[in-house]
Image: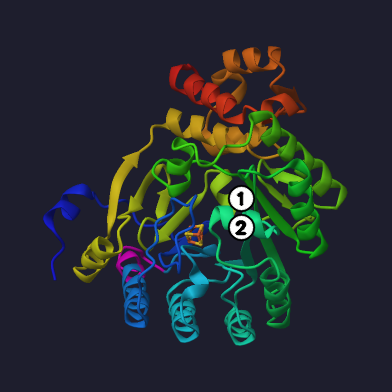
């Protein structure tokens, strides 16, 4: 079947992924058994085994469409299955998907293959299959260990599902484990947040992600807030929770390496570091984003439209953008400032071709004087005060890159 003409019109083929160099692969599995109240990731909740099997067929076909553009199979440094709920794919389909990708890509340099999972979905057979198929890392969406908070978020799992899932993952051979937590949940106290944090630490994973609840437009949570049915946490409480997480996790041997991410030494998520250092990644599946050498786009965020495009042998991309060198430099600065190691001048100049000291001179001066950044030893880091207004600091650097002069 041919794709609708608007898909053709929206898409100017981006360059093929480079055959050499690190490339990350992100695959978006758009199925969930329930839509959580705060979530604005693309997923559908009514699916059948047949639709999931068709999804696997088509995502492999989408990979083939890419590979036809490459002189040789791209070398992947990392693979990440997100969603949605990747662990909702039936065991045979997940196995077929992993096997299909392994046959198509060069995985010689790939040291990390992560799959996100819902704590209510895993079995020992499933975890064994993942481990035996080469998956190295499991990321569990725990969010909270408090039943009432899980209910506010409309998460459909129990706190006990988290340790049970981690035991299954370890028994299946998955050694690198992450727990996702959310703080600033309506009604959550600082003490309640600390209880969840300590419960997560006690489970001994090598990585934790802690995100403040955000009220994305048009989610049920945002509607409830507008109607006065839930009250967002005060900004001061949210900041106290973030600071408590940083201190508590550092004491537990999991220092922050990014604003929201914490890991034991050398256990940082390689795939996410690729995003935060302006690297190249390719997205497969509906709504997945891609970035190759300053061109970026996203796949159609609709399963039906994505299916029609791929069935018609068209790449299902939209919103293709070419970033100017200055835009790339500004965005790179914004991403690097999220990292604890910050923006290192040498790395920045190697990756962007610009001198950070020249390009951002007024912003560095202003932010430094306001106490929002530290500049020392050839790098810039957010200060403690800067962490609480990180988006504002990033915006200053973006604006400075757009307006700046010199290289
Ligand atoms: S399980 Fe994850 S992707 Fe699915 S609705 Fe909940 S938060 Fe969103």
SS of the residue at dot 1? helix
Residue in the foreground of this view, choosing between 29 and 11: 29
Task: Point out which mark residue 150 bears.
Answer: 2
Taking the spot 71% from the left edge, 45% from the top edge, the residue there is 257
The quarter of the picture where residue 217 lies is: top left
Q: Which residues are magenta?
A: 63-72
Q: As displayed, is residue 9 above or below residue 97?
A: above
SS of the residue at dot 2? helix
Looking at the image, residue 20 sits to the left or right of residue 182; the answer is left
Q: Position of residue 281 (x, y in %)?
A: 47, 54
Q: Position of residue 192 (x, y in %)?
A: 75, 48
Q: For the residue carrying disc 1, how many other residues have a C-alpha within 10 Å: few (<14), some (14-19), or many (20+)?
A: some
Looking at the image, residue 246 sits to the left or right of residue 394; the answer is right
Is residue 65 in view from this perspective?
Answer: yes
59 magenta-colored: no
The residue where tag 1 is placed is 273
How far is disc 2 from disc 1 in space, using C-alphas?
29 Å
């Amino acid at each position: 079947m041919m794709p609708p003409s608007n898909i053709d019109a929206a898409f100017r083929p981006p360059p093929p992924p480079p055959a050499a160099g690190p490339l990350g692969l992100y695959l978006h599995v758009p199925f969930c058994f329930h839509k959580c109240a705060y979530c604005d990731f693309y997923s559908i909740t009514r699916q059948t085994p047949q639709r999931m099997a068709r999804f696997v067929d088509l995502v492999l076909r989408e990979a083939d469409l890419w590979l036809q553009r490459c002189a040789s199979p791209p070398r992947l440094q990392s693979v990440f299955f997100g969603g949605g709920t990747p662990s909702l794919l039936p065991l045979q389909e997940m196995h077929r998907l992993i096997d299909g990708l392994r046959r198509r890509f060069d995985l010689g340099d790939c040291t990390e293959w992560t799959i996100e999972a819902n704590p209510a979905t895993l079995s020992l057979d499933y975890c064994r299959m993942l481990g035996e198929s080469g998956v190295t890392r499991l990321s569990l969406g725990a969010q909270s260990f408090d039943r009432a908070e899980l209910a506010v978020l409309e998460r459909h799992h129990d706190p006990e599902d988290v340790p049970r899932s981690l035991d299954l993952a370890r028994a299946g051979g998955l050694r690198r484990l992450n727990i996702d937590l959310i703080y600033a949940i309506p009604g959550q106290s600082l003490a309640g947040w600390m209880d969840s944090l300590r419960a997560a630490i006690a489970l001994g994973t090598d990585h934790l992600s802690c995100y403040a609840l955000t009220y994305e437009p048009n989610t049920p949570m945002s509607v409830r807030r507008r109607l006065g049915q839930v009250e967002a946490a005060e900004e001061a409480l949210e900041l106290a929770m973030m600071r408590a997480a940083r201190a508590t996790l550092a004491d537990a041997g999991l220092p922050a390496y990014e604003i929201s991410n914490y890991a034991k030494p050398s256990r940082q998520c390689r795939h996410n570091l690729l995003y935060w250092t302006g690297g190249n990644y390719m997205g497969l599946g509906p709504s997945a984003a891609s970035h190759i050498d300053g061109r970026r786009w996203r796949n159609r965020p609709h399963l039906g439209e994505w299916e029609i495009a791929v069935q018609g042998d068209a790449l299902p991309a939209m919103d293709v953008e070419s970033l100017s060198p200055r835009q790339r430099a500004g965005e790179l600065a914004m991403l690097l400032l999220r990292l604890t190691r910050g923006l290192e001048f040498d790395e920045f100049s190697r990756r962007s071709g610009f001198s950070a000291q020249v390009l951002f001179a007024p912003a560095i001066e202003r932010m430094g004087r306001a106490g929002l950044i530290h500049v020392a030893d050839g790098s810039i880091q957010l200060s403690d005060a800067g962490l609480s207004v990180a988006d504002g600091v990033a915006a200053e650097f973006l604006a400075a890159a757009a307006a700046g002069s010199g290289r």
